[in-house]
Image (spheres, grey):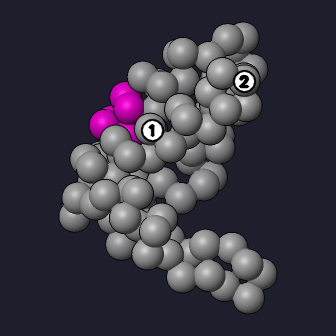
Amino acid sequence: MKKADKEEKLIRDCYRELFANSEPSADFDALMENATINNRGEKEIPFMDHEIEDVLLYKIIDKYAKQLKPKWERRRFKNSILLGCSPKTKYHE
């Protein structure tokens, strides 16, 4: 498996777990399949309709990120998830 394919699989697997653990729970593959297409040809996933606690969010992201080396690839992976279509984060005070 090529490195780019491995990273893409990790991203998809991470999103699957994030949405499965969000409120309300969702199937990420179904969200992708049913996403509307905007005028730029991009899929619009209603990720803001789902919420996940910050501790759980980072725990799940770290679980997948630690499979990457070196450190800068882990950081890039985390940023991709957080800046992508991850569920809305519920922070504790």
Nearer the observer: mark 1 or 2; the answer is: 2
Where residue 34 sits in the image (x, y, percent)?
A: 43, 75
**Secondary structure found at label 1:** helix
Mark 1: amino acid: Cys
Which amino acid is tagged 2? Lys
Label 2 CA crowd tier, 10 Å (few <14, some 14–19, many 20+): few
Query: In the visual, does 54 lie left or right of 8?
Result: left
Q: In which quadrant is the N terminus drawn? A: top right
Residue 53 position, x and y percent, is: 30, 47
Name the chief secondary structure element in magenta.
helix
Q: Residue furthest bottom?
A: 39
CA gap between label 1 and label 2 equals 18 Å
> Eyeballing the image, is 36 above or below 92?
below
Residue at point 62%, 17% (across, down) = 68
Residue at 62 percent across and 27 percent down: it is 6
Q: Position of residue 81 (x, y in %)?
A: 57, 44
Residue located beneath label 1 in the image: 14
Q: Residue at x 65, y 44 (%)?
A: 80
Question: Which percent across, then down, holds residue 50?
Answer: 33, 65
The one nearer the camera, 64 or 71, is 64
Labelled disc at residue 57: none
Please check the rendered image and state whether residue 33 is part of the magenta-colored stretch, yes or no.
Answer: no
Q: Which residues are magenta?
A: 55-60
In the rendering, which numbered label is found on residue 2? 2
Q: Quadrant of residue 79?
A: top right
Q: Are dots 1 and 2 in contact, CB under 8 Å?
A: no
Q: Nearer the viewer, residue 88 or 4?
A: 4
| Residue 7 visible, this orientation | yes
Above or below for 56 versus 46: above
Task: Judge whether residue 51 can be spotted in this image.
Answer: no
Q: Say whether disc 1 or disc 2 marks the residue closer to the N-terminus.
A: 2
Does 57 appear in magenta?
Answer: yes
